[in-house]
């Protein structure tokens, strides 16, 4: 009997979770049973993300052997990320103006969710300028940064440590071997943990549907449809054009990453696929030195789906309140989002927090977020999948830019997986 592939297992878990959640809608006991299963899966993934990032970056940097080359790589990566996320913000604003998803909504029919738990974090983000982002990159205590999962600080330390190993040459070989062994062991652990993914997906989606019900989508259905169609347009047209310029087909890439995309979509967490994305993009033809730097950095600087959603949702809330934003206000919104959306990926409910910090600056009532909080999980699933595609493509673009993309490295087995 042919074994069912992981993508199908996760899909089955997703469908069964939706059915169970719908059947037990409003029953708090089902959440009590399922939540621990989902939490265990997410914790298993978070447990291995930091060691993988640290070991992969250190090995990647120490293997470069050229400081100038590394500086050039970092500069190109940040420029590319800034261009793509700015396009995502502009697209979100334009689509919201064209389709007016917030116009004519009866706010009395919407359930309001308490958003106070996000307010304190949003106040910190509101004061989060470019200078703060740069300062926060440098950790005062690397062990604190590791414990808190502060990815930018972890990347900064790992890059410097890799430089140190590169500089001391032969004396650094035993340490480099240790981190290479750590990376290999962590990728093995990842493959074992992924076997638990269908159960984690089943539990997480079951809890979501049992809490909010499928009918919670009806009043805000237009927003959900517009967000999903815009995300699809962004992936196929915008990222598809970038992929074509890089010499790859976007649908081939999507097919190759199907397991990871289904998992990221169902868990609404891009962290769940970070280790596998790094591993698979290396097999796809990107050198380890680039994947180990570009993909973790993209988790803070290249959240295409999140920035697109934030722009669209901000205009949606303004429309819901009947506020007609001027062109200058919308440009201000774009500029504010370009700053607030960077470097805070480790914050729970990051898109929600960024929106809370951003809305007030352009005169949109932050209370409006309470009306869409109930369906935020459904929207989060879409933007997470887009973030994963954007970061995977980023590794290809930078590899191509550096003249190091080697598509012939894709083995016959990988081609079979992608088909």
Image (tube, rainbow, N blue to C red):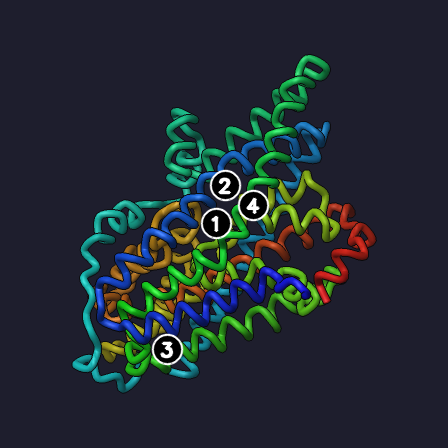
Image quadrant occupied by the C terminus: bottom right
Give the spatial CA distance, label 1 vs label 3.
26 Å
> Mark 4, mark 3: which one is toward the viewer?
4
Image side of residue 242 versus residue 211, left or right: right
Return the x and y of residue 229 as percentages of the image width and height.
Answer: 49, 77
Instruction: Decide which of tag 1 and tag 2 comes sooner along the chain.
Output: 2
Q: Which residue is mark 2?
A: 49
Around disc 1, counting alpha carbons within 10 Å, would you say few (fewer than 14), some (14 to 19), or many (20 or more)? many
Residue at the (26%, 48%) spot, across then down: 121
Residue most extreme to the front: 1
In the rendered image, the residue lying farthest to the top is 171
- In the figure, residue 356 lies in which quadrant? bottom left
Q: Residues within 10 Å of mark 3 (few under 14, many from 20)?
A: many
Labels 1 and 3: the sequence-earlier one: 3
Give the residue at x 69% y 53%: 396
Of callouts 4 and 2, the N-terminal one: 2
| Chain-order first, disc 4 or disc 1 | 4
The one nearer the camera, 194 or 392, is: 194
Residue 388 placement (x, y as % from top left): 54, 57
Residue under pointer 4:
192
Residue indicated by mark 1 = 271
Q: Is residue 190 above or below residue 257?
A: above
| Distance between mark 4 and mark 1 Cα atoms | 16 Å
């Amino acid at each position: 009997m042919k074994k069912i592939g992981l993508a199908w297992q996760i899909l089955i878990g997703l469908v069964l979770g939706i059915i169970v959640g719908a059947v037990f809608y409003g029953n708090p006991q089902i959440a009590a049973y399922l939540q621990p299963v989902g939490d265990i899966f997410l914790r298993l993934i978070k447990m291995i993300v930091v060691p993988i990032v640290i070991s992969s970056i250190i090995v990647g940097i120490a293997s470069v052997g050229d400081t100038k080359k590394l500086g050039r790589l970092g500069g190109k990566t940040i420029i590319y990320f800034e261009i793509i996320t700015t396009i995502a913000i502009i697209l979100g604003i334009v689509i919201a103006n064209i389709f007016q998803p917030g116009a004519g909504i009866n706010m009395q029919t919407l359930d309001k969710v308490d958003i106070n738990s996000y307010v304190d974090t949003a106040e910190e983000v509101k004061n989060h300028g470019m200078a703060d982002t740069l300062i926060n990159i440098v950790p005062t205590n690397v062990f604190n940064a590791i414990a808190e999962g502060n990815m930018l600080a972890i990347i900064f330390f790992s890059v410097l440590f890799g430089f140190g190993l590169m500089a001391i040459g032969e004396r650094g070989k035993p340490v480099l071997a240790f981190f290479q062994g750590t990376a290999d062991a962590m990728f093995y652990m990842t493959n074992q943990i992924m076997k638990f993914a269908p159960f984690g997906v089943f539990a997480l989606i079951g809890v979501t549907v049992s809490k909010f019900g499928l009918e919670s989508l009806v009043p805000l259905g237009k927003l959900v449809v517009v967000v999903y169609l815009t995300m699809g347009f962004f992936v196929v047209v915008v990222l598809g054009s970038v992929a074509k310029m890089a010499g790859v087909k976007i649908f081939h890439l999507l097919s190759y990453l199907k397991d990871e995309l289904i998992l990221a979509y169902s868990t609404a967490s891009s962290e769940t696929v970070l280790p596998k994305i790094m591993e698979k993009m290396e097999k796809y033809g990107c050198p380890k030195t680039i994947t180990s730097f570009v993909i973790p950095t993209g988790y803070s600087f290249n959240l295409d789906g999140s920035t697109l959603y934030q722009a669209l949702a901000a205009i949606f809330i303004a429309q819901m309140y009947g506020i007609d934003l001027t062109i200058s206000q919308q440009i201000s919104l774009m500029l504010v989002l370009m700053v607030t959306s960077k470097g805070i990926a480790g914050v729970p409910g990051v898109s929600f927090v960024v929106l809370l910090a951003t809305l007030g600056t352009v005169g949109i009532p932050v209370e409006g977020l309470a009306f869409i909080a109930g369906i935020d999980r459904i929207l989060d699933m879409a933007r997470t999948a887009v973030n994963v595609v954007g970061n995977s493509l980023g590794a290809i673009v930078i590899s191509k830019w550096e003249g190091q993309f080697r598509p012939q490295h894709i083995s016959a087995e990988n081609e079979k997986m992608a088909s």
